[in-house]
Amino acid sequence: MTLRDLEKQAFLDHHGWGDATRCVLAGDASDRSYDRLARHGETAVLMDAPSGQGDDPAQFVAMARHLRALGLSAPQVMAQDLDAGFLMLEDLGDALFARMTARDPGMETPLYAAAVNVLVHLQRQPVPQGLSDLPAGDWAAAAALALDWYRFAIAGHRIDTTAFQIALTRALTDHADGPRVLILRDYHAENLLWLSGRTGLARVGLLDFQLAQGGQPGYDLVSLLQDARRDVQPQTEEAMIAHFATAIGQTEPNFRRSYAVLGAQRALRILGVFARLCLVAGKPGYVSLLPRVWGQLQRNLTQPGLESVAQACAVLPPPTPESLQRIEAQCGAFR
């Protein structure tokens, strides 16, 4: 056993779950991992979030408390050791939106409508104090990862990103830089669960919200509808955009411009993040997702208000099979 395994067992022993059976539940793009625990007919989820890796479990605890106070279904924190990076969480089950829609595509629209209603409710509440609230320039700098890592992985050299950041900063300022709301950032089908035994907004289970911050109203909607891991039906995306715009009191044309700018920013950042995960973290599984994200970027860039951003993005090579092979060939080379 590793030292980390011994620490994990000590945490479970201390909280009366030392005899629980464990099975790996999930991992993600961070260094967190999750085990499902089972004992005496009960289940729970163990989050292992090693310290010093960028994700603070204290932020998860604080945000879970906030979401639950709003009547939403974040997991209850059953036990914690924040210094060691262990949380024992309520087990919300396996009914992920991604699995349910894969089995029955007809469930997509009603499930996504419920998820949009959660966003509307969440954004009507004040943003908790102390969360980061980044200006447009910082959002543009985050999107420059597309040049720093995605383009670099294919072209083999880096270029200056100043003009790119100026163009995106201007587009964000003009179309998507209004009053801030709480955004959860990774609001998509693999982080949402359907809790059929609950009612109202509480039927949507929420996961992976520890990086929540102040942000633009359309950001989480983009995360939901322009999913890097699955294709959302066009009719679902259109219906949810219209529903959300009406619910937050924006005209649909104005909101669509904001949605497209945020969608471009998010797609650009993800292109860079996924390429970096391969090159630096040695995680090649994200490379196969790049063509979908590229397609989302191209759709967003055709929208009004993004002409200068589209021009700045002309330096990005498309994810051809040859380009993807080049990225994979460098997997882990920049650890």
Image (spheres, rainbow, N blue to C red):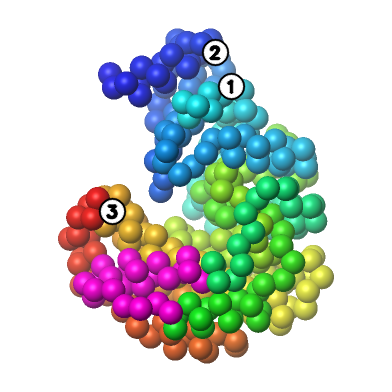
Can you see residue 305? yes
User: Badge 2 local density, few (<14 within 10 Å), some, or many (20+)?
Assistant: few
Q: Report the magenta stretch's main SS.
A: helix
SS assignment at label 1: strand
Q: Note whether residue 234 is visible.
A: no
Q: Nearer the viewer, residue 99 or 174?
A: 174
Measure the alpha-carbon separation of dots 3 and 2.
36 Å
Asked whether 37 or 164 is in front, the reply is 164
80 is higher (above) or lower (below) than 223: above
Picture coordinates of residue 46, whole percent (x, y)? 49, 27
What secondary structure is marked by label 3? loop
Give, as a three-letter code, the residue at label 2. His
Q: CA distance from mark 2 to mark 1?
A: 7 Å
Residue furthest to the left in view is 329
List x then y, in percent, for residue 273: 39, 60
* Labels 2 and 1 touching (C-beta < 8 A): yes
Q: Depth-wise, is mark 1 or mark 3 nearer the camera?
A: 3
The residue pinned by badge 3 equals 280
Would you identify the image quadrant in which residue 255 lies?
bottom right
Residue at image mark 1: 79
Classed neighbour count for the residue bearing mark 3: other residues with Cα under 10 Å, few (<14), some (14–19), many (≥20)? some
**199, 287: nearer the viewer:** 287
- Give the mark nearer the N terminus: 3 vs 2: 2
- Residue drawn where x is 43% and y is 79% of the image: 162
Give, as a single range, the part of the protein colored magenta. Answer: 140-162
Question: Is residue 292 placed above or below 303 in the rendered structure?
Answer: above
